[in-house]
Amino acid sequence: MKTLVTGGMGFIGRYVVEELLANNHTPIIFDHHRRLAKEYPNDVEIFQGDIMDDVAVTEAMAHCDSWIHLAAVLGTQETIKNPRPAAKSNLIGGLNILEAAAQYNLPGTYIAVGNHWMNNTYSITKTMIERFIDMYNRNRGTKINIVRVVNAYGPRQLAAEPYGCGKVRKITPAFACRALLGHTIEVYGDGKQVSDMVWVGDVAKALVKSTEKACEGVVFPVAVEIGPSENKTVGEIAQLIKEIANSDSEITNLPMRPGENAGDKVTANNETLKYVDMTPDQLVSLEEGMRRTVEYFDEYLKTTNHILKICTTEALTNLTQSNRKPLRSSREGKLEV
C-alpha cells in the first residue's frame, strides 16, 4: 500500500508514517514544510505543498494508491477569533483531497474530531467534510472511511508558549510542562468537563487499519470513534499528571475558553473500534500513556534550547537536577514512544 499522508510531519502524522512503515507499507508525506525531513528514512518520499493548492494535491495523489488526510488548521478559541484560515484550509483543502480521490479512484481515510458538535471553526469545518464524504461515497463512488479522534496525546506533541513553539495550547503538554517546572497548572472551567484521552500510537493504528479496509473495498457504515472505556475529567487528568511528575504544583481554575462549555463531554463510542479490528482493552491505558509522555517532557525540558525559551529564573532553578524531584514512576533504559 502506497499511502499519501497529508500533514505527515505533524504530531499524529509522524506516528502514522511510522505505523505504515512498521506494516510494510510505503508512506508518501505531503506537508507545507520540510523541517523534520531529517527524522525520516532517506527513502521516504516528501511532497512539499499546500492542501489548498488543488494542482499540488492532484499531482501528489497521482503517485499513490491510498491516502490518509490529517492536515488542518487547529484550535478552539483561536479559530473563533479568526475563522478564515481554518475555514479555507479545512474546507477547500478537504475538498481538494476528495476531488483527487474521486478522480483517481483512490480509497482513503479522513481524520475527524471527537468534539464534532462543538461550535468552533475547527470542529464545524472538520464535521462539514464528514458530510461531503457521505456525498462522495454515495454519489461519486469513492471508498472513504472516517476515524473520529478524541484528544490524542503522547511524546513529541508540541507545547505552546512559553514552553515551546506550538501555536495551539494542548492539554497534555501544558499540564506536563507546568507540573515538571513547579508552575501552577491552569485548568479551564471547574475541571469537571469530560475529555477522553487516547494514546497517539493507537490513533495511528486505527488510521492505518481503516485505510487497509478501504483498499479492500470496505466502507464503514459509521465513523470509527477511538477512545477509552473509562471517562476522565480534565481535573482528574491534571491530578494524574501532577502525581506522575511528583510535582508540588498547585491546580487553579480559569474561565472557560470560547467555544467550550462547562459540563462538556468529549467521549468516544468505542464499540465502533470493531470496524478496524481493535477493542478498547487493546488501547494503551491512560496512566501508562501519561507516564511515557511525562517522561518525554521531562527530557524535553532539560535541553538547552528549551531552557532558553522558558527563560525565567524560577524555571531555570526548577530545571536543575538538584532541585527537581524524580518522577513518580521513572524507569531505567530507553524511553519507548
Image: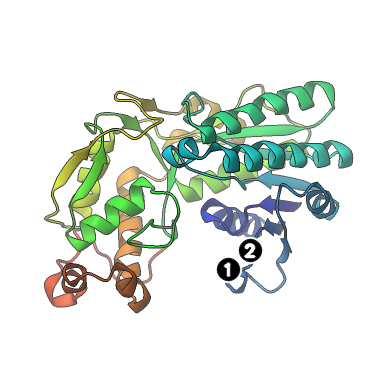
Percent coordinates x, y for residue 331 in the rendering: 27, 66
Secondary structure beneath dot 1 equals loop
Instruction: Note whether residue 24 is visible.
Output: no
In the rendered image, is residue 40 in sight? yes
Residue 14's disc is none
**How busy is the neighbourhood of tag 1: few (under 14 within 10 Å), some, or many (20 plus)?**
few
Pick whichever, 143 or 186, lies toward us: 186
Task: Point out the frontmost of discs 2 and 1.
Answer: 2
Say if mark 2 contacts mark 1, CB within 8 Å. Answer: yes
Q: Quadrant of residue 23?
A: bottom right
Check the image and report above or below for 309 versus 215. below
Q: Nearer the viewer, residue 177 or 209?
A: 177
Q: Is residue 335 left or right of residue 327?
A: right
Kind of element beneath mark 2 = loop
Q: Quadrant of residue 111?
A: top right
x then y, percent, for residue 199: 43, 47
Q: Is the residue marked by circle 2 packed among few (<14), some (14-19), or many (20+) residues within 10 Å?
A: some
User: Is 223 displayed left or right of 141 in the figure?
Assistant: left
- The residue sitting at 35% across, 56% down in the picture is 293
Three-letter residue code for mark 2: His
Could you tell whether 120 is left or right of 233 in the image? right
- Report, in whole angstroms, how far the alpha carbon at label 2 lies from the one at label 1: 8 Å
Could you tell me the amino acid type at mark 1?
Leu
Give percent across and percent down for residue 112. 57, 35
Residue at the right extreme of this rendering: 103
Q: Residue at x 44, y 38 (%)?
A: 76
Q: Which residue is mark 2?
A: 33
Q: Residue at x 35, y 57 (%)?
A: 292
Residue at 21% over, 49% down: 185
Q: How is the image coloured?
A: rainbow
**Residue 250: x, y in percent?**
13, 49
* Residue that numbered label 1 is attached to: 36
